[in-house]
Image (cartoon, rainbow, N blue to C red):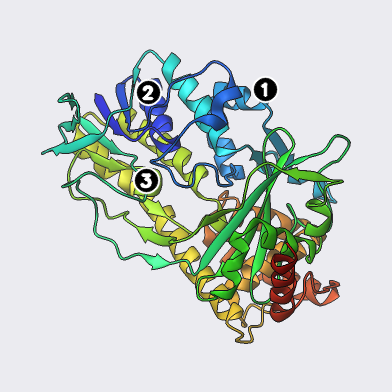
Amino acid sequence: MRFAIAGGGVAGLAAGLAVARAGHSAVVVERDHVMAQDEPDGAFDVVRKGIPHFQQPHTFLPRGRRVLRDLAPDVIATLLDAGAEEQDLSAKLSGPRVPGDDDLVYLWVRRPMVEWALRRAAAAEPGVRLVAGRQITGFVPGAGGFHLDDGQEICADVVVDALGRYRVPPGWPRAAARPSECGAIYYCRYFALVPGAEHVTGPWLLNPRGDLGYMGFNTFRGDNRTFAVIFLVPTADHDLRVLRDDRAWMAAARAITPLDVMTSPEHALPITDVMPMGGLANIDRTAGSGVAGLVPVGDALCHTDPAFAYGLSFSLVHAQALGRASAAHTTPEDLTEAYLADVGPEARERHTFALETDAARTLAWSGTPVDVSRRDGCYPLFAFAAALATAPHDDHVLRRTVGRVGLLDPVSVFDTDSDLHDRIERIWPQLTRTPCGPPREQLLRTVTDELVRS
């Protein structure tokens, strides 16, 4: 079959590789002028107007790493050679290893590097043709392909919608969806470790993260000794939007443990300005457009709060599923039905998970008391925050928690494990919990004073 893929980001490139390696041909069309490069040096200079979050933190969750290893082991090898880093959480287990522990590994790499490696592999794949710098102007009825702004018509048996969660060409068929606001704005900044410094370690399951009761923070490692720090601020808190200013952001970081150490000049130096990201929503389009031969992948199928970092991994999961469907079915109608049946249930489950967790987080940040210590309290935060905090202290909790947040298990595996819930409830009261930052008004005074001084 012939595949016409709209969008040359991670989802589109992975889909092109997957169907080509299943024996088909694919044309991948990207609106931005991006070309395949042999070396990663220019990956961060690429202008990606079509992807506003291009420079924002991304990571391959354990599921994404496993799928990439199966789908394109050459790509994962290229990333590791270029400076991507793996973090094996099985090292935190106190008892013997069991089957499945080899998957408890995160792959840390920045988004531009991921696209560079995938585009390099796609360009070398005999069944893939890359078209860059061309905009799609219209959809050919019946999923027969699409028109480009230079008059070309890309003909195909199957059209892949890898256009992301943002704009689509006029008349482009998509499933109706009702967006649900994530409830937060993200203020991110990337740093590079100075010579001799190492990534901060501590009691966290993964990397430093915390909640101040009115906002939160998270950290993500990157490739080549880089890391990102993200402030998660309630959309409704307009005062805290001051954190978009580099000076205010740094003042806030200095007031929070362990960000004060991580962002100190003795430990790391900033390599980007503060990058705000707002207007975020959870969107479920898994019902499909109703057009046989039109299949959505990545954020075009389902988009969730970036705090959960599902984007890269689901792009690979969807590409792999598309490859399976293309190998098993010979008509666009059968392929579309089989693909949506394959990827839909998991995407819907994770969409619901994101909605519930976002709602609980918003409630907590509004000042409403929530109990995360018990399953019959605020369950979404019990199963997220309490699980992450207790995981380093119990092997079963660790495996189940990584399975949940790392997409290795269905959400239901965690939700139906009463022994797991008992362990979390037993461990939680034994943990030492100290405030990681000042109260809201004190933080605002700190950042305001910094702006006045400078």
Label 3 is placed on what type of residue?
Gly
Badge 1 or badge 2: first in the primary sequence:
2
> What residue is rendered at 53% in x and 60% in y?
411
In x, y percent, where is residue 166? 34, 50
Question: Where, by quadrant of the figure, is residue 99 drawn?
Answer: top right
Point out the frontmost of discs 1 and 2.
1
Badge 3 or badge 1: first in the primary sequence:
1
Q: Is residue 47 left or right of residue 114?
A: left
Alpha carbons under labels 3 and 1: distance apart: 28 Å
121 lies above or below 421: above
Alpha carbons under labels 1 and 2: distance apart: 26 Å
Image quadrant holding the C terminus, namely bottom right
Alpha carbons under labels 3 and 2: distance apart: 24 Å
Element carrying mark 3: loop
Answer whether residue 83 is visible to the viewer in this image: yes
In x, y percent, where is residue 38? 54, 15
Label 1 is placed on what type of residue?
Asp
Name the residue that disc number 2 marks. Answer: 22
In x, y percent, where is residue 285? 31, 55
65 lies above or below 355: above
Image quadrant holding the N terminus, namely top left
Name the residue that disc number 3 marks. Answer: 164
Name the residue that disc number 1 marks. Answer: 81
Element carrying mark 2: loop
Q: For the residue carrying disc 1, how many other residues have a C-alpha within 10 Å: few (<14), some (14-19), or many (20+)?
A: few
> What residue is rendered at 37% in x and 59% in y?
283
